[in-house]
Image: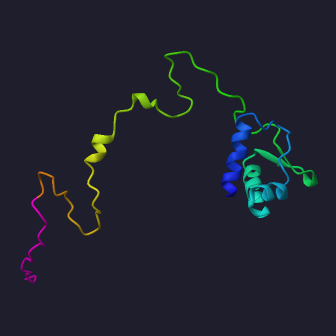
Amino acid sequence: MAATIAGQIERLIAAGELRPGERLPAVRTLAADLGVSPATVAAGYRSLRDRGLVKPDGRHGTAVAAQPPLRVRPARTLPPGVRDLASGNPDPAALPPLGAALAQIDTAHKLYGGPAILPHSPRSRGPASPPTASPVRSPS
């Protein structure tokens, strides 16, 4: 839950809804509003502090850092035909359909000690037979 609290506050900072210097709710107040322990809220705030998003201000509470390490402005709209590479995600329309490929996956468990070659492989000759023992000769 602490991670959820931290994530929500981070999204508000990134969206510009919480501005630098703006105070966060008191730990006990937010805990009561969310129905969680104050320790849970404090852990979320600590995570944000450790990442430089907020700054504790003693008895005055916790405020958004003056320069949080996030882009706090919304991204610009790109002109038509321009690919957005900043998000790191591919354009879903450019990806091939995966249904047919996923339907061919063998979902049986593969465990250690099982056959090394898949059963449908042209090289497969069934289960491997144990090696035959060769006679051991003593040195002369």
Magenta segment includes 136: yes
Q: At which x and y percent is residue 25? A: 84, 49
Q: Is residue 26 above or below residue 126?
A: above
* Residue positioned 15% across, 52% down in the render: 121
Question: What secondary structure is the stretch in magenta mostly built from?
Answer: loop
Q: Nearer the viewer, residue 88 or 102?
A: 102
In the displayed structure, does residue 80 sit left or right of residue 35? left
Q: Is residue 16 above or below residue 40?
A: above
- Please say whether residue 69 is visible from this viewpoint: no
- Please say whether residue 129 is visible from this viewpoint: yes
- Snapshot quadrant of residue 110: bottom left
Q: At which x and y percent is residue 23? A: 86, 44
Q: At which x and y percent is residue 52? A: 76, 45
- Report the magenta residues as a range: 125-140
In the displayed structure, does residue 60 sit left or right of residue 97? right
Magenta segment includes 111: no
Q: Residue furthest right?
A: 59
In the displayed structure, does residue 41 sit left or right of residue 89? right
Q: Quadrant of the N terminus?
A: bottom right
Q: At which x and y percent is residue 31? A: 79, 58
Q: Is residue 113 above or below residue 77?
A: below
Q: Nearer the viewer, residue 25 or 86?
A: 25
* Residue positioned 34% across, 35% down in the render: 97
* Residue positioned 58% across, 19% down in the render: 78
Q: Quadrant of the C terminus?
A: bottom left
Q: Nearer the viewer, residue 113 or 6?
A: 6
* Residue positioned 71% across, 29% down in the render: 73
